[in-house]
Image (spheres, rainbow, N blue to C red):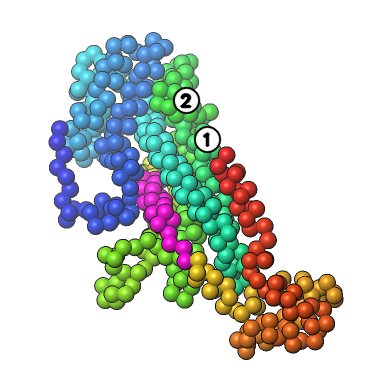
Amino acid sequence: MTHTPDTFADIVHPMDAPLFKGLTSTPEMREIFRADGFVQAWLDVEAALAEAQAEIGMIPAEAAAAIRAKADVRLIDIARVQAHGKQTAHTLVGVLREYRANLGDPHQTWLHYGATTQDIIDSATMLTLARAHAEVERQLDALIAVLLELMRRHRDTLMVARSHGNHALPFTFGLKVAGWLDEMDRNRDRWRELKTRCLVGNLSGAIGTFAAWGDQGLEVQARACRILGLGVPRTWWHAQRDRLAELLHGLALIAGTSARVAQEIYVSCMTEIGELTEAYTHDTVGSSTMPHKLNPIGSEWVRSLAAIVQGNAAVMDRLMTPLNERDGSVWRAEWVTVPETFCLAGAMLAQLHKVLAGLRVNDARMRENLDMLKGVLLSERVMFVLARSMPLGDAHEVIHDISIRALEARQPMLDLLVTDPRVAAACDRAELEEALKPENYTGLSGAVVDALARAVAE
C-alpha cells in the first residue's frame, strides 16, 4: 500500500520538522523508530511466537510458515487499522484483523494463539530497543575514539586548570580530555551491561501465568525470545517497568557526561578565554544582526538535548507504577517517552561527536592564560620550595601574603619573592625562576594520559 507523507503544516514535533529533524534526531535512530517499524516489530513478534509454538507441536508448522510469510507491514492497510482503532479503542486488534484477513483459513486461527496485547507490544518494544541500544553503543565507540585521539594529540599541551571558576594550577589539555574520556568510557561499560539485564522479551499470556499454553508455556516463551534475539525473563513483567527506566537512566548518565563536556567547551570558547573554538567555515553565521559572531552552536545543542534526555528519565521513573498485574494508565506514556528519548540521545551524541572531531585548540592562548597571573599560578610550587627551610604552615602564610599582594598590584610574583627577606633567606632567584615555570609543575599529567590511553585502547 502507499502512504501519503505528512505535509509541512501537519508536523508538530521538531524531530519530524524539516527545519530541525537533522538537529534533534539522526537518520539511524529515525529508521529504527519509524512508525511502520513499530508495526513491523509487532508482526515479527507474532511470527516468532508462532514459530516457537510450531517447534513444540502446539500449532501446525504450515500455519507458522504462513504467519511468518505474511509478517510484512506493507501488507497491512494502516487506514483500516486506524478505523478499527476508532471502533474498538484497542491498539493491536486492528492490526490482528488485517493480519488474519491476509492469512485466511485455516492459518488465521493460530495467529496470536494464547498471547495478550502487552506480550506483543512489550516484546516488540524490546526488539526495537535492541537495535537502538546497538546504535547508541556504536555512537559511544565513535565518540570515545575521537576523545582518545584528542587526548593523545594534546598529551603535553600546557593549559591552566581551574577550580571554583578560578585559576588553580598548570596541567595539560590532554589531562582535561582524559577526564572526559574516562567518564564516557564508564558510560559505555554501563551501557553494555544493560543489554543482558534489560533487553528481554515477554510472552506469558494474559496475566503472566502461561495458562493458555499449559505446561509448555515457559518453553514457548524461551524459544520465541531466542528467535527474536532477546533475553528470556525469569517472570512475566507486564507491571515491571524498571528495565525501561534503567535504559533511560543509562541514557541520562551519558547525557550528563555529554552536557559536562559541552559546557567545558562552551566556556572555553568565550572571547575572554579563547582556548577552544568549534569548527566553522566562512559561511557560518552566528547572528542575524552581529556579523562577527561565531557561536558554539554544537555545544549548545548538546546541552539542550541532554536536558530533555535527563528529564525523560525522570518521567520514566513515574511510569514504574502500573496497578496490580497490568495497567495502561502509565504504559501508554512509554510509547511517547522511550522513542523520543532515544532519538534525542542519538542527536546529542552526534552533535558532541561533530564538535569534538572539529574542535580547534588554541594552544598559544592557553599559554597566554597560564601567564595571566604573572607567576601567582605557581604559588603551591613556590610554597613547597620554601618549605624546605621552614614549616609548611609558615611557608603557606608567607606565600599567601605575597600572592595576594601580587594579585592586588598586578605585579609579577617573582619581583615580590626576591625582595622578601623571608624568601630571600631560603631561595635564590634562579631557584625561584625554575619554580615559576608552568611546564615544571604538571606532575604526572602525561603518565595519567598514557595509562588511560592504554586501558581504553585495550
Q: Which mark is residue 441?
A: none
Q: Quadrant of the C terminus?
A: top right
Tell me which residue sits at (80%, 87%) in the image. Answer: 421
x 39%, y 48%: residue: 346
Residue 124's place in the image compared with 268, above or below, is above
Q: Amino acid at mark 2?
A: Thr
* Foreground pick, 243 / 303: 303
Question: Can you give x and y, in whole percent of width and height, for residue 400 in the image?
Answer: 72, 80
Q: Is residue 429 magenta?
A: no
Write the start and end of the magenta stretch as one range: 336-362
Q: Is residue 173 above or below residue 104?
A: below
**Image location (x, y in percent) of residue 393:** 81, 75
The residue to which callout 1 is attached is 197
Pinpoint residue 354: horizontal percent, then vertical percent: 39, 54
Q: Left or right: where does residue 437 sit relative to residue 247? A: right
Under mark 1, the amino acid is Arg
Quarter of the image that includes the N terminus: top left
Q: For the residue carrying disc 2, how many other residues have a C-alpha within 10 Å: few (<14), some (14-19), or many (20+)?
A: some
Mark 1–mark 2 CB contact (< 8 Å):
no
**Secondary structure of residue under mark 2:** loop
Element at label 1: helix
The residue furthest bottom is 409
Task: Give the mark nearer the N terminus: 1 vs 2.
Answer: 1
Q: Nearer the viewer, residue 426 or 309?
A: 426
343 in the magenta segment = yes
**Where is 445 relative to 454, above or below?**
below
Residue carrying label 2:
209
Residue at the image position 49 percent from the left and 54 percent from the top: 150
Is residue 132 visible to us here? yes
Q: Nearer the viewer, residue 321 or 306?
A: 306
Q: How would you classify the magenta stretch by its main secondary structure?
A: helix
Question: How many angstroms separate mark 1 from mark 2 (CA)?
Answer: 22 Å
